[in-house]
Image: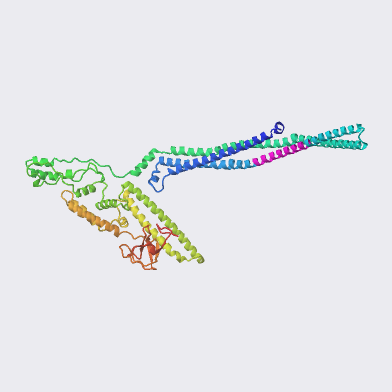
Amino acid sequence: MSWGTELWDQFDNLEKHTQWGIDILEKYIKFVKERTEIELSYAKQLRNLSKKYQPKKNSKEEEEYRYTACKAFLSTLNETNDYAGQHEVISENLTAQIIAGLARYVQELKQERKSHFHDGRKAQQHIETCWKQLESSKRRFERDCKEADRAQQYFEKMDADINVTKADVEKARQQAQMRHQMAEDSKADYSSILQKFNHEQREYYHTHIPNIFQKIQEMEERRVVRIGESMKTYAEVDRQVIPIVGKCLDGIVKAAESIDEKNDSQLVIEAYKSGFEPPGDIEFEDYTQPMKRTVSDNSLSNSRGEGKAEPKFGGKSKGKLWPFIKKNKPPPPPPASASPSAVPNGPQSPKQPKEPLSHRFNEFMTSKPKIHCFRSLKRGLSLKLGATPEDFSNLPPEQRRKKLQQKVDELNKEIQKEMDQRDAITKMKDVYLKNPQMGDPASLDHKLTEVSQNIEKLRLEAQKFEAWLAEVEGRLPARSDQARRQSGLYDAQTAPTVNNCAQARESSPDGSYTEEQSQENEVKVLTADFDDEFDDEEPLPAIGTCKALYTFDGQNEGTISVVEGETLYVIEEDKGDGWTRIRRNEDEEGYVPTSYVEVYLDKNAKGAKTYI
């Protein structure tokens, strides 16, 4: 089966068919290219979807991903992202293995097709030229034969006419012979050209055209094979990513199977457990006491007798009340003794006296966990001001323990980091001592001293939080004196104030003190507490130095005057308001405009930023 023998006369149809084959190949390339674009678009949308639902860093969402269900969802997002990556791989492989190769092959195919059909047209033009030569020689031979025949007839006519001279007859004879000679030459030429044409025609139809058509057939068959291989590659590209896609799906299934509802329930307990004990039963308080006094014969004696039994109902409650409970709060106790004006003209409806502030203090002091009066006041005021206490005393016990533990872990990490830095500086100093040409060992003393001071500060800070943690966990019965000194929240002046609160309660006949006393003590406690907090506050460490570029008077409150060229310590960098906090010595510090000084921050200082 050969196109050269079977389709020897279908040159134009073969030309159209091969062009159609190239169009089909280009159409397939376009199809694969659009598939790659779809894969890239799908992968991009999957990645955006996965990114959209990823938890934001340093947000509440990130804390929620402690639960196994949220972890499984996060794993699903990650696997979806990997799944999107496989679609990108499909797109890349289709582009590299099919589109690029077929694009080059189409160009080569077009050049080869053009060459083959150019040879075919050249052969056609050659055979047509030979045919024209044959036709021309044939017409010339025919014309010469006719001319020779006419010349012969004219000679015979002249020769038969007796009136014609001999010269005319001779001339006619010579003309006839010349025409016969020309006919013979045309005949020979026609015969030669005919033989040549027949030879060229046999070569054209049996050699040249079959060879050209055979090459075109082979070219077309290669095109068909190539498009079939491309289709196989198209399928293999998808098949290659199936195992990885299967792993992604297996990862999602594994993440779903890892969900532990019991563990999530335990995490909810750890997240919201307050550590308080449930409130106890509320005792019955008898409001019929004034009525009994009016009905009895001797109201004054009964009231005195009842006054002695009064603390049973209005004194310290045996029921343990939750200190923050708001509902069902017991009313204040009735007065200890009935005044003469209470029943001047007979029984009256008992009026509920205004609840004194001292009674609220008694409730807090008698309930568990006990909260010292000055600490509760500070906590309430801090919450109103929007500030968080350093010891997290505004949190429930369990949440406070977690925060303190987290703070201790952070401080230990910082201590380890500083110790590693100190070890590195020490090793560098030893190297300088052994090889002085590499550097001056004395230049590292300041840095070594500064790191040691930072370590000591961090250790004191860690000890302070460990003491608070120990108090919360119950390892220590009460906060130690050392922890009190470190926290900056306790001072010798606060103890008498607290004792005054307790003494006032004990000195009251009914177990409480008057509202005037409580308010006075509140003011003393609050003043002492804030004085202690600010007096015991440790000075901020220096995070760098600065040089004054201009002279600044510093007349406003909170500012400090500087002289041009003066060098000072930076203790707080510019927060965006245009002011930098500096220190001249332990007693002189304040703010100066940032544009008036040139700041050199210490890279190793805690909280310092590097500026170039």
In front: 300, or 122? 122
The rendered magenta stretch, by its main secondary structure, is classed as helix
User: In the image, what residue occupies the spot 89% across and 32% down?
Assistant: 157
Which of the image's four quarters has the C terminus?
Answer: bottom left
Residue 140 image offset from top left, x and y in percent: 81, 36
Image color mode: rainbow
**For residue 541, which quarter of the picture?**
bottom left
Nearest the camera: 528 or 37? Answer: 37
Whether residue 370 sits left or right of residue 127 in the image: it is: left
**What quarter of the picture does the N terminus occupy?**
top right
Closer to the camera in the image, 460 or 157: 157
Residue 127 on the magenta segment:
yes
Expressed as whole percent of the image width and height from the top left, the position of residue 579 reads: 36, 60
Q: From the viewer's perspective, is 234 left or right of 258?
A: right
Residue 5 in view of the camera: yes
Q: Is residue 115 magenta?
A: yes
Q: Position of residue 160 (x, y in %)?
A: 91, 31
Residue 484 in percent (x, y) is at 30, 56
The answer to whether residue 229 is seen in the rendering is no
Q: Is residue 525 above or below residue 286?
A: below
Q: Which residues are magenta?
A: 109-134
Outermost residue toward the front?
Answer: 163
The number of numbered badges drawn on the structure is: 0
Q: Residue at x 25, y 53 (%)?
A: 374
Identify the residue shown where x is 45% and y is 64%.
Answer: 444
Residue 396 located left or right of residue 211: left
